[in-house]
Amino acid sequence: MSSGALAGIKVVEFGQVVSAPYCAKLFSDFGADVIKVELPAGDAARRMGPFPGDVPNPEKSGLFFINNTNKRGVTCDVASDAGRALFLRMLEWADILIENNLPRQMQKWGLDFETLHAANPRLVVISITPFGQTGPYSAWNGIDLNAYHLSGASNRYCGRPGEAPLEHGTFSADYFGAVTAATWGMGACFGREQVGGGQQVDVSCAEAIAATFVGGQNIGGYAQDGIFDKRTGVGMPQGAPATIVPCRDGHVWMLALEPGQWNGLRKVMGNPEWADLDLFQDMRARAENADLIYPFIEEWAMQHDKMEIMEKCQAAGCPITAVFTIAEAAEHPHLAARDYFVDIEHPQLGVVKNLGVPFKLPASPGGPSSPAPLLGQHNDEVYRDIAGLSEEELDRYKAEGAI
Amino acid sequence: MTQALPLQGIRVVNLGWVWAGPVTGQTLAFMGAEVFKVESYARVDMTRNLPPFAGGEPGPNRSLSNHACWAGNGSVSLNLKKPEALKLVLELIATADVVIENFGPGVMEKMGLGYDVLRQAKEDIVMFSMPATGLYGPLKEVRTYGLSLTSTTGLDSLVGYKNGGPIPVENAYSDPFAGIFGAFAILAALNHRRNTGEGQHIDFSQQEAIMQMVGPAYMDYVLNGRVGGPKSNEHPVAAMAPHGVFPCAGDDRWISLAVQTDEEWKRLVALMGEPEWAAADNYTTVAQRVTNIDELHRAIAQWTQGFDDRELAATLQQQGIAAAPVLDVADLLTDPHFVARKTFVEVDHPLGFKETIYGGYVKNSGYDAAVVPGPIIGQDNEHVFKDILGMDDERYRQLVSEEIIY
């Protein structure tokens, strides 16, 4: 048994792309025994990349590599009777199933929750989908993009007025849903004795974001007063400066709201005369005069580099940060000092860096240590040791194409 | 019959403030943990004074956004500047399983509530700290707000219109993300305690938690040395096209639309009435569509702009194409899907007003999440000091009059 915090927990993952794989990675990286079950064609992430040199190869996908560490991998054709039976046998072993198939697909395979529950009444089934298992959109096709934009997050918080609302440029709904699912799923597993067994944990990525990110800050006011806000394209329209501003070598998140912060920024800028104007002495007044103040600030910022601006402003007490590029974040000494980047040796990719643990548990450290599995890499050992197949049965399942 | 909740019997003392820390407590409370936020009228959390207020009447127990984000946390009021209050909070911690805090590194120590002190009160305590960039490292003292913290992860550099600069996200996506994530870290530590009897001090760097979302772009950097940038709503690893948000009829109405397979593309072309531009062999395969994505998206925007967003989404879904309306805040309250899932609920607040908050945003077949209105400062004082800590009436009244319980 591993020494990780989740040692002893047995998980079957039957997912693709980001949400279920990343959720299951949170379990595997912290010491749970996670078996990833893939259809014969493999997780769709294997076909997505990024690939080294942009040459597609199902064993070299960066997306698959990063979200599937510390798992063992098997293949199973659940669309066949034999494969489905084998899958259900695996679930008898498991404490948790993590899956992100559309509800209609699970039904088509004969793997609806009632069936899973009958196979193992103690099983916690974590289902992560864009819309959820119930409600009018539960029958819809959808991916991360649709979930994010259904949540209200983009219309409310990102983009210029009159132009398209924006997502983050990553799978932000999938990651949000994955983390939400790991948390609520782990809760259901932890309290399984007192709630009387297994259950389905139904996570809608759209709903989790609509509730906690958008709803929390907006819905009470709208329900009461009928007034609501939309994106403005400015970081914080009520105060200034509070937005992303270009500088000589990129961008900085310019924030100086409270008097101490504003005075700090003035000092760093060399106490320019314009900053003495009365109408710039209060954050709200500055926001009302945004079209005056931002050009002044930009003019100064364009003569300086982002890391220099960040360092000097931080020292002067302003919460100003550089907008790190991916390269700057990936090479940052702070993150390196915290061992956030971990070398993983992969049989086909070689030694490749991976992001480390999202949080540190000193008494039970976790983190990625073994690489994402090759397609079907652990078929023999898993089906022999966990599903209890004999050599003969194993050969027969393989011949029939179930494995 | 009272239903059994999975985290019943877990007690949490929450020193978290503003948004992320309270969300961590809330998440555990939804699942049945008993969570007491420790706060005080001596220094009221700024989010308690954010408008709009219930009934339009300002007051620290009436902020509607504060209530939604904090609901589930109970409240104990102690002025921790006073030594007697510090003793009491340690007495409460001695009965607890978890302590949550989201101050900067070292603040708990200065308050007299460092991990060593907590361990003396309760040997196997799980202490959860969630500073912006972790408890140690050269950048640990960095000052950020929740909405700009993402800039230190690379995430902000990916947000914006294609070929343009970064566009700010106007609120802290990181706060509820890290808040919920924190509850997972706590559950992992509780599981370790169950396995071994050992507590621990969790170092949860919000920066590192958020940077997990940057994984796909990070891999492109690691494998190819490429540094990603804003690309509107295109697919994060360019694996499909179309993949975007397109205008519909009406003011600020949009639809999200993604085509995952060539088969779906054929159905979309048929639905568009087999236009001439789509017949050209520029869009037959995913690779072609991704290569020619700018023209493709322009043409699709021409087609979508006359349609009602909801009707068009329904039509596309009938063809099995992933599409959904882009909702605004007002839509959330009336959208049939969120209504059916009871995402938002109106509750009666004990102070005599109604408030709309979010309920259990995850649906569990085995129990209903524990949903309660936002906390009043000190609402659980009598229960905590008298029932849990066994304080007598007289001493309780004295501590209230001395503004120690305050």
Image: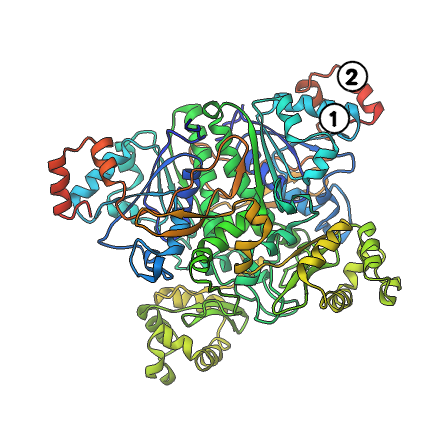
Amino acid type at image mark 2 = Glu
The answer to whether residue A331 shows anywhere in this view is: no
Q: Is A21 on the left-hand or right-hand side of B183?
A: right
Residue that numbered label 2 is attached to = A393
The amino acid type found where label 1 is placed reads Arg
Give coordinates of residue A117: x percent, y percent.
Answer: 61, 25
Real-space CA distance between mark 2 and mark 1, rounded to the nearest whole angstrom: 15 Å
Q: Is residue B316 left or right of residue B279?
A: left
Q: Which corner quadrant holds the C terminus of chain A?
A: top right
Q: Residue at x 17, y 33 (%)?
A: B391
Q: Label 1 lies in what chain?
A: A
Image quadrant where one finds the N terminus of chain A: top right
Residue A87 drawn at (x, y percent): 70, 26
The disc numbered 2 marks a residue on which chain? A
Which label sits on residue B64? none
Q: Which residue is mark 1?
A: A84
Kindly state the secondary structure of the residue where label 1 is placed.
helix
**Residue B19 in sight:** yes
> How far across and down, in percent of the image, does residue A347 sit?
71, 37
Q: From the viewer's perspective, is the residue at label 2 or at label 1 nearer?
A: 1
Instruction: Out of A374 and A221, give the one closest to the viewer.
Output: A221
Residue B317: horizontal and vertical position, in percent?
73, 51
The quadrant in which residue B113 appears is top left
The numbered mark, 2 or 1, whose residue comes first in the sequence reads 1
